[in-house]
Image: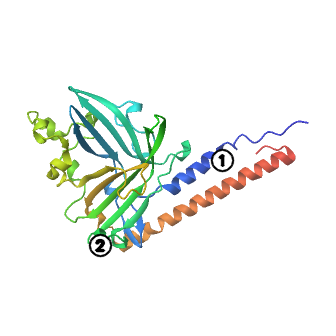
Amino acid sequence: MRLSEPPTFLPLLPILLHVTLTSASTYACNDIRTNGVKFDLSPLKGPHNISHTVKEHPSVHNTTFTLDICGTLKRPKGLKKDEFCRTNTWVCGTEYVEHNGGSTLESVIEIAGDYSMDAGGRLDAKWELFSSSSSHKDVEREGVRVTMNGGSKDVEDAEGKKTKRKQQAIIEFICDKGRTGLEDWEESTVRFDAWSRGRKSKRDEDDPEDDPEDDDEGGGDDEKDNPDANKDRSLKFIGYGPPSGGKEMNMDQLRLEWRTKYACEGASNGDEESGSSAHWGFFTWIVIVVFMGTAAYLIFGSWLNYNRYGARG
């Protein structure tokens, strides 16, 4: 007896399922809604990076965090595949160690992204209004917070065995009507295009005689020893490490603060504009559901016909 072979297009089912799950785990940054308030953060789209430096004599550890709040990152030109995070990464960290005038890549950290196709974590972005938060600190602020997941870091446990350490990014968008949030890049104080391993800014190139050792003669954490260095930036590094309170010790959190007028409630208003785009998200899901339903119907019908009558198509 000849066994019937399944139609050749059945392997497409996992791909269609992945596309649907990925769409569900991401979001449209021009239509972020939480507690009935809409935010349009699309003007902040594109790759942005901020560096954190720790001096541990005689070495300097420099970690550059790169993020795109509106989509996945692309590997910068000039970097090899193993020098940056995988595809589908939204927040990436690259740590370099500088010693004796040289620089060595220490680690690449996938902090947030959607790796469900590779049996990894999902972005699962969660948005929260400051005004809806139970924190006393948030009561006095206006804006929105996003928590992004999915990443992991390769580490060694106490026995020297390799394991995965969960990663998470928390970005607080704070309402500042006097800032676009892009001032740091408009003034060319950071150069993502040249990259230069995330270690040199445009300001460094403009003033080559400025000795970096003079910025922090005592060593240690730049932000702690010189708190004003990070003060006037729109995008600020707050911290990276285990969450405070010891709730989840097998995890690192990257905490950033971004001051921008686009985080002000009502900044994306214009009821006419909001009205048409407000229903676009719902309409998109209707299209996706209809498409998936039609595809499932056709595939199942073809499979049934093939098994019953040996018919193809």
Which percent across, then down, holds residue 89?
43, 45
User: In this figure, which residue is indicated by the disc labeled 1?
Assistant: 13
Three-letter code, disc 1: Leu
Residue 245's place in the image compared with 266, above or below, is above
For the point 29% across and 72% down, the residue is 139
Q: Position of residue 25 (x, y in %)?
A: 50, 55
Identity of the residue drawn at 8% across and 33% down? 209
Q: Secondary structure at mark 2?
A: helix
Q: Number of marks in the image? A: 2
User: Which residue is tagged 2?
Assistant: 139
Q: Nearer the viewer, residue 237 or 117?
A: 237
Q: Position of residue 236 (x, y in %)?
A: 25, 53
Residue 91 visible in image: yes
Amino acid type at mark 2: Val
Q: Residues within 10 Å of mark 2 (few under 14, many from 20)?
A: few
Picture residue at 31% right of the left edge, 66% below the top: 143
Q: Is residue 276 left or right of residue 193?
A: right
